[in-house]
Amino acid sequence: MNTKKEKVNILLAAFEADPFFKSGGLGDVAGTLPRYVVSDNYDIRVILPKLKQIPDKYTSKMKYLGNFTVPLGWRNQYCGLFELKFAGIIYYFLDNEFYFHRDKAYGEFDDGERIAFFSKAILEAIMHMDGFIPDVLHCNDWHTALTPVFLREQYMQVPGYSNIRTIFTVHNLKFQGMFSDELIGNVLGLSGTPAEDQLKCGDAVNFMQGAIKYSDMLTTVSPSYANEICTEYYGEGMEELFQQRRDNLVGILNGIDYKLYDPMYDKCIKYHYSEKTLANKQKNKLQLQEELGLPVNADIPLYIIISRLTEQKGLDLVDYIMPQLMERELQFVVLGVGDEKYENSFKYHASKNPGKMVALLKFDAALSNRLYASADAILVPSRFEPCGLTQMMAMRYANLPIVRETGGLRDSVAPYNEFTGEGTGFSFANYNAHELLSCIDLSLSVWYDNHKAWVRMQRHAMRKDYSWHSSAKAYRKLYRKLAGK
Ligand code: ADP
């Protein structure tokens, strides 16, 4: 019997993808996921805007495929289509210098129009891909949220298009694409259609709302976050819609690149180690302590934060407990940039506690790897966390996460069990500074009073698999199910 499966065609649409351009987690996912999905049975291609920010080394290798016009309200706008084969994946780039050749990728005065152009150009471009018609169009975040709407409202007559199924993935619910409702007629060309009502949110048009209503399937980046966004606390006003679509909403945990983040081979660290050679981890710690002017002592636990310094990350809780934290027997290093109030607070406490705390207020990827490799514990007390990568990176480096039980933190960190000694970190439930402090105290008691349990947890954490392999498997399954193949 021939068990070969039918090939599934997928077009993944995003506004950014590593290594071409990346500003956050979306870029990581769009850059990495396709490389893990692609196989003989899955032809996954990626479509992106040809942004000014893409380095010449990539643009110079792109092949021009042709051009077409994109109808946008009363306008007909030029769009060029380029192709680049890179790391085994076909990437398509949509070119319009007026919309995409800007100094900033996001935050322009006409973002509504630029994004509408991108969302519609994706559908026009499919007609120029040499017969490649996706079974599944995988849209990501608000920049591609209108594509499922345009597909159903304006493109169903195009041969092959009525079979296209859509997935919309929410990476960041904070940005929904809200603009004056004038855009509905003027730019989207949808006034008087059923879409008008579906897109309206009060006096505004809300692009993401369109995707939530029109996509065949909705996903987000962890199972817990999929539950959370159905509640008022996390739903950012979309909770009722998510509740209505609950049967078509799943959470798939993101992964991290296990080749890039590997304590055995990481080029940023001096002493490489595995779960069998954890003593080498200590050498990294001693070196870092010396460099940062901290007492060089392997017995004092080194706690870190590596984060954007924003409210989302639970830094109000950390700020609140700083005086008590500084009374504990530990060292504390913060690597981050962001809101001035948090930067100032960390700077203040570091100046008050020399030899105990260091605030590194910058973005430094190489240093972050050295911190993961040197530290004993990392604080991630987020208010909300769709997936979160720092806790996974930390576990990979035998650095135990102390997290709030929310979103992807809850799905990836197994809390310490005092009775069995099992676990890969420590966690607390409520967004409360005292709970955070008790959780840190629990971790300190394990460090000082039951160090064997600590080392056992380090090994458990290192053995966990948060690579992209398992996420890609879940996406493949979903793609195939939607494609009906
Ligand atoms: P978010 O995407 O919400 O910022 P994640 O945990 O998903 O949070 O990802 C954060 C990523 O950014 C991690 O790879 C982390 O190591 C990195 N990072 C955050 N702040 C810094 C910094 N100041 N220097 C270097 N890397 C940082």
Image (cartoon, grey):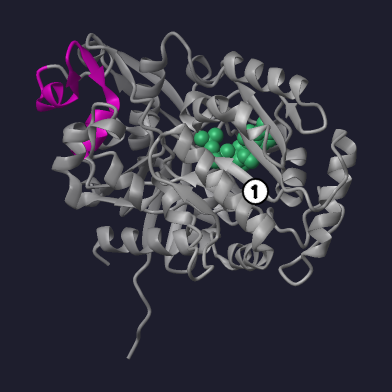
Give the mark count.
1
Residue 223 vs 337, above or below: the answer is: below
Q: In which quarter of the image is residue 307?
A: top right
Residue 109 vs 29, above or below: the answer is: above
Q: Position of residue 222 (x, y in %)?
A: 39, 50
Which span is picked out in magenta? 192-214
- Of residues 22 and 429, the one nearer the viewer is 429
Q: Identify the residue at image location x=60%, y=64%.
A: 457
Residue tagged by mark 1? Answer: 377
Q: Report the predominant secondary structure element of the magenta stretch.
A: helix
Query: Does the magenta portion include 348?
Result: no
The N terminus, quarter of image: bottom left
- Of residues 86 and 347, the one nearer the viewer is 347
Q: In which quarter of the image is residue 119?
A: top left
Which amino acid does the dot numbered 1 rest on?
Answer: Ala
- Of residues 173 and 54, the one nearer the viewer is 173
Q: Where is residue 87 in the image (x, y as percent from the top left)?
A: 62, 54
| 152 on left or right of 326 | left
Q: Identify the residue at image location x=48%, y=68%.
A: 419
Q: Where is residue 126 in the image (x, y as percent from the top left)?
A: 37, 42
* Mark 1 Cα shell of 10 Å, populated few (<14), some (14-19), many (≥20): many
The C terminus, quarter of image: bottom left
Mark yes or no: residue 447 visible.
Answer: yes
Residue 221 vs 414, above or below: the answer is: above
Q: Identify the residue at image location x=51%, y=60%.
A: 416
Residue 432 vs 402, above or below: the answer is: above
| 227 on left or right of 345 | left
Q: Where is residue 338 in the image (x, y as percent from the top left)?
A: 60, 21
Secondary element at image label 1: strand
Q: Identify the residue at image location x=17%, y=41%.
A: 243
Mark yes or no: residue 59 visible.
Answer: no
Query: Does the magenta portion include 194?
Result: yes
